[in-house]
Image (cartoon, helix red, strand yellow):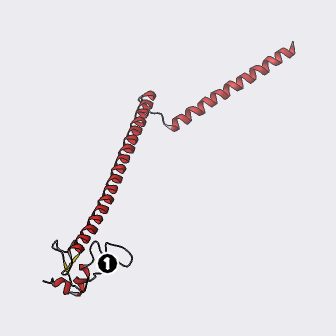
Amino acid sequence: MLNSASKSPTKGADVGKHFGQTSKTGDSSMSEPKEMDGGTTRPSRGGGRGGTIHENSTPADMVSRYQELQKLYEDKASEHEKLHSNIKKQKESYIRREVFYKSQISHIKDTLEKTVLCRGVEEVSMPKIRDMHRKILGTIGEFHARTTRSIEEHERDLSRQ
């Protein structure tokens, strides 16, 4: 009982491209179909997913094929578990960073609110601060000029005596 898919040149080539058969490069996941003992190949009962079964395959060949598939399954399950644990670690790391960033944002917001409250309702802008700075420097300059004149007058008075 041959499947019509194995007779088709395009579909027949795909039949052997399933798990477990080794290719020239040693990759067991994709390879060309091979005939064992001159027999023809047909898809397995699982819809062709598990590789090929030959009509004249012995029970030992089938057990060997089962063991290959079992090892492949275990390898894939191990890889899946590693990927799953990596994703879990990445999620945990993301959550830790997110909590840290949110706490920093909260702290900065609190600091900003306290700063605004200390200034009062009226917010002081940079132009106002610069204007105040100029006025203070002008007043200091006037005090310095008065002090200099006062010292000079005092020295003149002392020199007259």
Left or right of 58: which side holds 136?
Answer: right
SS for tag 1?
loop
Name the residue at 25% across, 84% down: 37
Tell which of 66 and 156 is nearer to you.
66
Residue at 12% across / 83% down in the picture? 1
How many discs mark residues in the rendered view? 1
> Which picture quadrant has residue 73?
bottom left
In this rendering, the answer to whether 112 lies above or below 65 is: above
Q: Could you say which is closer to the camera, residue 55 or residue 20? A: 55
Q: Is residue 82 above or below residue 54?
A: above
| Residue 22, image x, y percentages | 33, 75
- Report crowding for label 1: few under 14, some 14 to 19, many 20 or more residues within 10 A (C-alpha): many
The quadrant of the rendering that contains the C terminus is top right
Q: Relative to 118, is 154 on the left or the right?
A: right
Of 11 and 124, nearer the camera is 11
Extreme-left residue of the structure: 1
Q: Position of residue 9 (x, y in %)?
A: 23, 87
In this view, 50 is above or below 38:
above
Tell whether 150 sits left or right of 122.
Answer: right
Residue 81 or 158: which is nearer the viewer? 81
Within the image, what quadrant is residue 144 found in? top right
* Residue 127, percent from left and from top: 52, 38
Task: Give the labeled residue for mark 1.
Answer: 31
- Which residue type carries mark 1? Ser
Residue located 29% across and 59% down the image = 77
